[in-house]
Amino acid sequence: MPMTTHPRSSRIDRLSQRARRIVAVATLTGLPAMFAWSSFWLGTSVPNLIWGPVSFLLIGMTAVGAIVLYRFVRDRANLGSTSLDERQRQLRDRAWVLSYGILSTVVVALVGVLAILVLGMERVVTLDPNLMSAVALCTGTLIPLVPIAALAWIEPDQPEDD
């Protein structure tokens, strides 16, 4: 039995597409930006008083953004969901295709950068524990969020009630 569209009741449910896109970008960039900021900070004399709040702000962007996106999308991004109507299934499928495209682009870009560094510039790339921890945390946190963010990104605004 298809799920009927129920009236959107919370502010999150009524977010405009533009606002959802801002939340999606902030969510997907917050954690990697925190690791980049931390790497930059280690090579400077920036005091801990500045480093800490900026790091927590960037982590918070991902955490709060994830909550907002999960609340907006609910179970509509789940591939196994059988309670979606045809329009919702089409949006879900488009979101998953977009997700695969985004992830493929990121992987190809990273491999390309590494190839240029190693083969073209003859640099040595060291995968130390700090870098691998950052990669593991970003991967484990962000990959499940990509389809959610993609669905929030592509879903059109709900029509205004009269």
Image: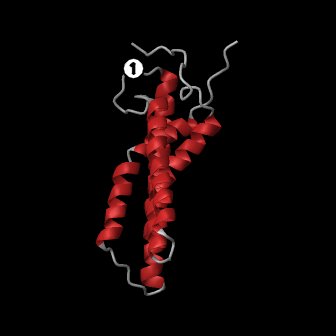
Count of marks overlaid on the render: 1
Using the rendered image of the protein, determine whether residue 152 is visible from the camera's viewpoint: yes
Q: Measured from the top left, where is residue 104 in percent x and y? A: 45, 56
| Residue lying farthest to the left in this orientation | 129
The N terminus sits in image quarter = top left
Going 50% across and 52% down the picture, which residue do you hit?
A: 57
Answer above or below: position of 158 versus 96: above
Answer above or below: position of 51 versus 58: below
The one nearer the camera, 111 or 65, is 65
The one nearer the camera, 28 or 114, is 28
- Splitting the image into 4 quarters, where does residue 32 fall? bottom left
Q: Measured from the top left, where is residue 152 in percent x and y? A: 53, 36
Going 64% across and 39% down the picture, which residue do you hit?
A: 18
Q: How is the image coloured?
A: secondary structure
Q: Measured from the top left, where is residue 133 in percent x and y? A: 32, 63
Check disc 1 and report its element: helix, strand or loop.
loop
Residue 121 as seen in the image, left or right of residue 140: right
User: What amino acid is at disc 1?
Assistant: Ser
Answer above or below: position of 138 versus 89: below
Going 42% across and 81% down the picture, which residue do you hit?
A: 118
The C terminus sits in image quarter = top right
Residue for badge 1 = 83
| Residue lying farthest to the bottom in this orientation | 122
Using the rendered image of the protein, determine whether residue 109 is visible from the camera's viewpoint: no
Say few, some or many: other residues with alpha carbon within 10 Å of mark 1 (under 14 / 14 to 19 / 20 or more): some
| Residue lying farthest to the right in this orientation | 162
The one nearer the camera, 28 or 84, is 28
Going 44% across and 67% down the picture, which residue do you hit?
A: 38
Q: Measured from the top left, where is residue 116 in percent x and y? A: 48, 78
